[in-house]
Amino acid sequence: MENKYCKVCFNPIEPSSPLTVFLSPVICDSCLAKRKFHFNKEKIGELNMFSIYYHDDVLMQWLYQYKTICDYELRSVFLTPFELLFKFLTLNKVVIPLPSTDESIQKRGFNHLIGILESADIRYLDILGKTPGPVQKDLTLEDRKKVKDRIIIKKRIDLSKKDIILFDDVLTTGSTMVGCFEKLQELKPRSIRGFALMRQHYS
């Protein structure tokens, strides 16, 4: 069998179980063990949210390398080993990634959320956009609450009788997630829930 190497540490991936052959892991057991899994459910306003990690310095470093250093090969490490679970959770639902500005996508060279979804073979609709403005990580709590005013619907389609899953990498204040939730109400979906990889509390 061809050797596979961890996309984080580049060490060979040793088959830890017969399932390894079918799951095609992209990171080794050592790197997998460094992450802090924490399935979390909460409600922000009227939006039901869930996430699979709590604030984790290791995961934040991977996200930094992926999003800021533009290491596109890391796109597949974030949902692993939950690809099958996420496919089950999104079965018969419409996954919509949260928007980035055209400027940030052009600067990075790719849409980071779409990269993660495509790496797990998750179907999605890219219909939300964001108008230019300050980088969100530099905003105050009050300014973050105004982010929803920058969200637009790029393509208006019939989402009636559809269940929506909004997808993001990090949930902090939830302002963008809630803003997208409110904007999509214009398309009258049956339900909307939010999913974020990691829950990070704002400080």
Image (spheres, helix red, strand yellow):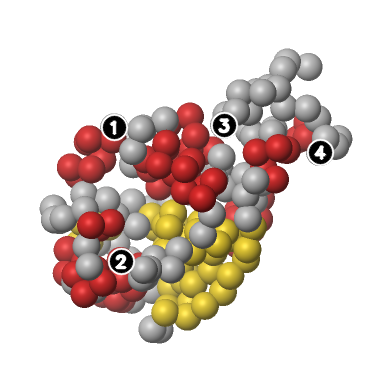
Task: Give the distance between the C-alpha atoms of the residues marked 3 and 4, in whole angstroms.
Answer: 21 Å
In the image, residue 31 lies at what x, y percent? 65, 38
Q: Tell me what residue is drawn at x 56 percent, y 74 percent.
A: 41
Residue type pointed to by label 1: Gly
Contact? badges 2 and 3 (CB < 8 Å): no
Mark 2: few, some, or many residues within 10 Å (few <14, many ≥20)? many
Which corner quadrant holds the C terminus? bottom left
In the image, residue 104 lies at what x, y percent? 23, 43
Among the two numbered marks 3 and 4 on one chain, the one whose residue lies closer to the N terminus = 3
Q: Secondary structure at mark 4?
A: loop
Residue at numbered disc 1: 109
Residue type pointed to by label 2: Thr
Q: Nearer the viewer, mark 2 or mark 4?
A: 2
In the image, residue 96 lies at what x, y percent? 39, 58
Residue at numbered disc 4: 19
Q: Residue furthest bottom?
A: 46
Q: Tell me what residue is drawn at x 29 percent, y 62 percent.
A: 157
Task: Give the distance between the C-alpha atoms of the residues marked 3 and 1, in whole angstroms.
Answer: 20 Å
Q: Secondary structure at mark 2?
A: helix
Which corner quadrant holds the N terminus? top right
Residue type pointed to by label 4: Leu
Task: Give the distance between the C-alpha atoms of the residues marked 2 and 3, in whole angstroms.
Answer: 29 Å
Residue at numbered disc 3: 8
